Amino acid sequence: MATVPSVSYSITVRLEVPAGGKAVSLLTHAVESAGGVVTALDVTNAGHEKLRIDVTCAARDTDHAQAIVDQLEAVEGVVIHKVSDRTFLMHLGGKIEMVSKVPLRNRDELSMAYTPGVARVSMAIARNKEDARRLTIKRNTVAVVTDGSAVLGLGNIGPEAALPVMEGKAALFKRFAGIDAWPICLDTQDVDEIVRTVQVIAPGFGGINLEDIGAPRCFEIERRLRELLDIPVFHDDQHGTAICVLAALTNALRVVNKDLETVKITMAGAGAAGTAVLRLLLAAGARNIVVCDYLGAVHQGRDDLDDSLRWIAEHTNEEGYAGDLRGAVKDADVFVGVSAPGILTGDDIATMAKDPVVFALANPEPEVSPDDAREHAAVVATGRSDFPNQINNVLAFPGVFRGLLDAQAGGVTDDMLLAAAGALAAVVAPEELGPNYIIPSVFHPDVATAVAAAVRESAGGRARGFTEA
């Protein structure tokens, strides 16, 4: 739940008030007294007796929005006509559409775009399948694939409920990288069915973005698709998060004058995102890392390790620490949380090394209160937009896919991910760098282009395969 009014819970209340007097000021006072924030007040119809007004305001959540409406209704002379949730209005009918890039104004244009002219293009591709990248939407199209099993922080809510999120992802692809992406929401959570479905639709796409698929199935799905397909397969929950974390950490360590190779890092979370972050940190040169899940530190002496946890145990925690997260945080230089809310306190952060870096990325409620963490940490980052240093995957995936598509890459490598992270970190100029600015805004004009250029150069034309860390 939001602690302060947010545009995510913005409402517009259409109402009538008596003309003249203090009616308008009473409306503003009513919203503010209920704890809301008036963001717009528009008179839509004026008469001698009545004014029709649209009051737009931000609330904390749906209950708070209703409390604001009740407070407005209690103002003398107010008649409520309609209450609109602005977020739901934005989603009416969906957020994306397909439009033609070519004119179809006459018979000549129709005959070239479709039959009979299109047959010539089809036969050219039949002779050389690679021409599909040049002559079709495959050149600039990504499938955003989900099974609805791990949507945002909402859990296993199914493919229909996942569709608004996938639409939003497609809109971000277009807005930040000019890529045409389409949501593919699958009504199955069977690994074999997912892999086969993506395999058979792949000819129509230049890349596959796996999204909101629960661990550990997501690991196998990605691995098998990489082996089967000749286009990039990128699981944003894993690799997008990893790129952003590495970029932000690179700059945070510059702020505190520490080196990635020597700092002690404690991580909370051994799922898809945590494992990908770990792999990329190791590939970047980190050496001293302890990973904790809900049972405590991951170490080789545990008897409950699956394949993924076993890999983590073999590549981290050289000293064999077997305690809990709070013990692992003690004397650490860096904490990276991609796990669960409220698992640490400010007192725990106080036990870390001098000038610690805290990335509490659970969303919407972080692993530790950012305000409490700031009392002891030199740099704090979260996944939230209402605090500085937001770690947001939109900083990575549009530029990554732009570079992959431009290079006509056949896969994704560690070097590409490292290049993307380095480019993202470099968007923050040295004179701008500071405790409250270690990662650029998602609206920074250089983000997508810088990341795309780095990936494109790393790809070197036609990249194949994925090197495991």
Image (spheres, rainbow, N blue to C red):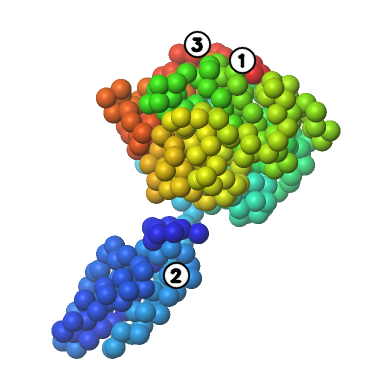
Q: CA distance from mark 1 to mark 3?
A: 10 Å
Judging by the rendered image, the residue that carries numbered circle 3 is 460
The amino acid pointed to by label 3 is Gly
The amino acid pointed to by label 1 is Arg
Q: Secondary structure at mark 2?
A: helix
| Pick the front one: 347 or 158 | 347
* Quadrant of the drawing holding the C terminus: top right
Q: Give x and y (percent) for residue 166.
A: 55, 45
Left or right relative to 59: residue 333: right
Depth check, mark 2 against mark 3: the one in front is 2
Q: Give x and y (percent) for residue 102.
A: 40, 35
The amino acid pointed to by label 2 is His
Q: Give x and y (percent) for residue 364.
A: 51, 51
**How many residues crowd around disc 1 within 10 Å: few (fewer than 14), some, or many (20 or more)?**
some
Q: CA distance from mark 2 to mark 1?
A: 52 Å
Q: Residue at x 80, y 28 (%)?
A: 301
Q: Secondary structure at mark 3?
A: loop
**How many residues crowd around disc 3 within 10 Å: few (fewer than 14), some, or many (20 or more)?**
few
Q: Are marks 2 and 3 in contact (CB under 8 Å)?
A: no
Specify whether residue 327 is in view.
yes
Left or right relative to 381: residue 27: left
Q: Give x and y (percent) for residue 40.
A: 27, 64
Judging by the rendered image, the residue that carries numbered circle 1 is 464
Q: Secondary structure at mark 1?
A: loop
Q: CA distance from mark 2 to mark 3?
A: 53 Å
**How many residues crowd around disc 2 within 10 Å: few (fewer than 14), some, or many (20 or more)?**
some
| Pick the front one: 298 or 163 | 298
Specify whether residue 110 is in view.
no
Q: Are marks 2 and 1 in contact (CB under 8 Å)?
A: no
Judging by the rendered image, the residue that carries numbered circle 2 is 64
Dividing the picture into quadrants, the one containing residue 87 is bottom left
Q: Residue at x 28, y 82 (%)?
A: 16
